[in-house]
Image (spheres, coloured by chain):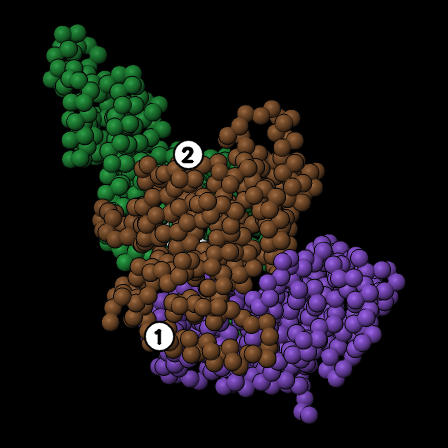
Amino acid sequence: MWKFTVRRLLITTPQIILLSAIVFILAKMMPGDALTGLIDPTLSQERIAEMREKLGLNNPWYIQYRDWLAGVVQGDFGQSFKYQMPVTELIWQRVINTFWLSLVSTIMIYAIGLPLGIVSGRYNDRLIDQLITGYTYLGFATPVFIFGLVALWIFGFMLGWFPTGGSVEPGLEPGTFEYILSKLHHLLLPSLSIALIGTVGTVQYLRSEIIDTKQRDFIITARAKGAPERRVYNRHIFRNSILPIAAFFGYEIINLINGSIFIEQIFSYPGMGNLFIESIMLRDYSVVTALVLLSGILAILGALLSDIILSVVDPRIRIK
Amino acid sequence: MSNPLLEIKNLKTSFRIGEKYYAAVDDVSLNVNENEVLAIVGESGSGKSALAFSVMGLHNRAKIEGDIFFKGKNIANLPTKEMNKFRGNELSMIFQDPLTALNPLMEVGRQIDEVLILHKSNMPKSQRKKYIIELLERVEIPRPKHVYNQFPHELSGGMRQRVIIAIAIANQPELLIADEPTTALDVTIQAQILDLMRELKDDLNSGVVLITHDLGVVAEMADRVAVMYAGEIVEIADVDTLFNNPQHPYTRSLLSSIPLLDDAQDKLHVIHGIVPSLKHLPREGCRFSARIPWIEEDAHEEQPTLHEISPGHFVRCTCYKHFYFPDESKEDQNHDVAKS
Amino acid sequence: MTLLKVNDLKVHFPIRGGILNRKIDAIRAVDGVNFEIRQGETYGLVGESGSGKTTTGKAVMGLNNITDGEIYFENELLNKGSKVNIRRDIQMIFQDPYSSLNPRKRVFDIIAEPIRNYEKLSKQEEKRRVQELLSQVGLSPESILKYPHEFSGGQRQRIGVARAIALKPKLIIMDEPVSALDVSVQAQVLNFMQELQEELNLTYLFISHDLGVVKHMCDRIGIMYNGRYVEEGTKEEIFNDPQHIYTKRLVAAIPDIDPKRRQDNFKFREQVKDEFTNSYNDYFDEDGLAYQLKPITDTHRVALPERG
Ligand SMILES: Nc1ncnc2c1ncn2[C@@H]1O[C@H](COP(=O)(O)OP(=O)(O)O)[C@@H](O)[C@H]1O
Ligand SMILES: Nc1ncnc2c1ncn2[C@@H]1O[C@H](COP(=O)(O)OP(=O)(O)O)[C@@H](O)[C@H]1O
Ligand code: SF4
Ligand SMILES: [Mg+2]
Ligand SMILES: [Mg+2]
């Protein structure tokens, strides 16, 4: 098991290095450079040239890449020109906010998706399944930002059940019960929006897995043993159908990152996605670079997590 | 004579295709006694599995008509809840494909344990484990303690089939239905599995329904044989009679299509055409006549029924009197019949 | 005339492991196999599953890397490197008629594929060739536009045969061609292959685990166990006078069609099984591998015990 993990990590390392190189090159291709964020527009041309030299911006690209990478490894992504603060510091709070949003969304995705998928697969082609399948088609057809907008408008503005922006009520003492409650209250609507749309893939996937597993020979063996339907479903069908879903868990992270970009924007939720769009619009490239790299790493780690989960739960590929 | 262990009377199992029901098993009647092996042979698509599944109550969307008496109780269309008391207990089944018949995510020991949990609920866990190890030994699995914790994919096809047999015999069934138990296995493994099944049957004194399309397996195992074609039984006899004095054209065609080991035939007999699909099964007259096209129209009976031509030997209709293979001359055939 | 000569063939598959996933051991799927096939004969290769039959066939076809040994076809060395040069004169038919044909391709493209690889024909000529081939294997020429799933198992196997004979090969390797078929269909395919052999003057390498079928089809037979030959001989020698305990066990395992001999067969099998268990250590080395073949007649070679 640990051998497998180590081996996978070894493969992951070059992937991440490659990713960083791509991100770096893309950043270089954007108009402007790290200096754009630092300089005072009134400075003289000579002064600027001097600063460029000092910051190493005249070095060949591989030296610059090396320097940049060295900084990144130490957690230094440079300066944000908009906020005039280190990118790392800026991102940190946002990462934590997005983490909570993703966590709650993930829980909701499975809390909604598993029961719906199970019911839909078990009673396939009955009315209940047709309703659920109908919902999944709708979910696939609806872009998450439109759904988020509608949800915000109805439940946030019209009904006023949920706050319409931010991650917590201002003025509350961190750590108090009210503070946590307020955080949750702010999270609920955005994560529900992500989950209701994001879960349809899980529902459909689980449904087709169950329908598939239902027809497998070993299910007949279980029935021939005299196992009641409840046991056939719980011990054999669900267990075997949920396995691929579990393996998919890591990939969900990628979905979440995509989903949260729009949702955070719509709900003015101060997370990574929100920051990302803001930074692109303001051409705050050091922040964009950092965020792209971070999401890329998360995606790679997500895939790794999926493989590890699969290797743990599936005895056929379990690695000793 | 006491009641047969299994008595099937006029069983008709139909599947729905589109708007209509089509019978895959059509008016079949059979008996199986204690310690008796009844073989059911026929090409694939003849309805053998459909028959077995009807007895086990494993069809989920089929219409089942007729009676299936197991130890005197009619179990046709029994509610699942009641059927579950029999299944895996007094009535158990072995399946064709050992590669797919076991749950890939469950240890072998636990899969056997399940059938004990279901039917011997008062047996404590430690005792069950001991018993399972004994069972694994009984089906000649080497290193049973180790295998107990293994997953199916870690075992060979032959070993998996032994596990499936262990599940089937765990509760000393009175009737064992084996649906092509060796079709997916190599000849050497097949011989071992058949020998094992025979020993187990003698130990348990159970009745066995052995489904196969391999007449070699029939000759090795069966006491009586029912030949099935297109949902119907066309011939039924004790095994010696069936092999030495086969009558129905279908039985004779099957027998002459196997490569025999003794006499080198030049050409194997080929049965014309294919088993018709359910929708295209002829429901009127003889179902086999399309596959012996060289036999004159007027040789066929309009409503062929099973006749008892000697004690215990039933043949559908009287056609056998007129049947000959295309490469034999008709005169030879008539001559033979006249002599006998 | 010798058509194919296989000389000390070895095919090993690496077993990888460790953190760097390097080769740590090897599966010796084929481990020193020698045989010759003569022009026009049907040579049977028999053994239980996993004994290396398919691997041998694939090696001859150039579908597997060869670890060691030489393969000669018409006295020409085929393998210069680790792979055999693919020859249009050698074709292979696979076991499972359900999965060996690409389900998304039409019969026309399936059969035309090998032709396109070797010959430049116009669309018209190509179509005519495919139709000819179809009627040669007893399928209606109209079926060229159908997909494999529209055919029965026996018909699909014929499509496989049509593809195999498209290039007029000299040797056809048949890997369990009838194992997945019903008896009656099996008879049909076997008869047809015998007819085809006469008609096209073909040589067959017939791989099977079913001795009944092998006896019906083959002139000479090689028995494999664990990647090695244990015995080779004419059909009569193998069936009437098996020498190696493994061959004896194989022959004893064949179901007898006469129910009267059942008890005797059962006893005989038990006896052979005991003999097998008792003399296993004489006939196989510490690794469970057979010894070198030794000739006992001109045609009969057996891996007899070397020790004690
Ligand atoms: N669940 C089903 N629904 C519809 N048709 C079926 C079903 N099961 C079997 N059949 C059809 O019934 C016929 C008999 O099948 P089966 O009993 O499996 O034959 P055998 O076991 O003799 O090969 C075949 O034509 C098959 O296609
Ligand atoms: N591509 C492969 N990689 C690794 N092992 C293989 C491969 N192909 C076959 N083997 C192994 O080689 C042995 C012989 O296999 P095979 O030639 O398929 O046997 P047979 O055809 O006699 O059943 C088996 O143990 C099999 O698992
Ligand atoms: S004669 Fe009778 S059984 Fe024979 S083929 Fe005709 S009807 Fe069928
Ligand atoms: Mg069947
Ligand atoms: Mg093979």
B1 to B109, vertically: above or below: below
Q: Which quadrant does the N terminus of chain A fall into?
A: bottom left
Establish whether labels 1 and 2 are both on one chain: no
Q: Residue at x 41, y 34 (%)?
A: A262
Please give the label number shown on residue A262: 2
Rendering quarter of residue A97:
top left
* Chain identifier of the residue bearing label 2 in the image: A
Badge 1 marks a residue whose secondary structure is helix
The residue identified by callout 1 is C277
Q: Residues within 10 Å of mark 2 (few under 14, many from 20)?
A: many
Q: CA distance from mark 1 to mark 2?
A: 71 Å
Chain with brown colouring? C
Considering only vertical position in the picture, is B127 above or below A108? below
Residue B90 position by quadrant:
bottom right
Quadrant occupied by the C terminus of chain A: bottom left
Is C33 positioned to the left or the right of A66 in the image? right
Which disc number belongs to residue C236? Answer: none
Chain for colour purple:
B
Please tell me which residue lies in front, B7 or A307: B7
Instruction: From the rendered image, report the letter of the chain displayed in green.
Output: A
| Labelled pair 1, 2 in contact (Cβ < 8 Å) | no
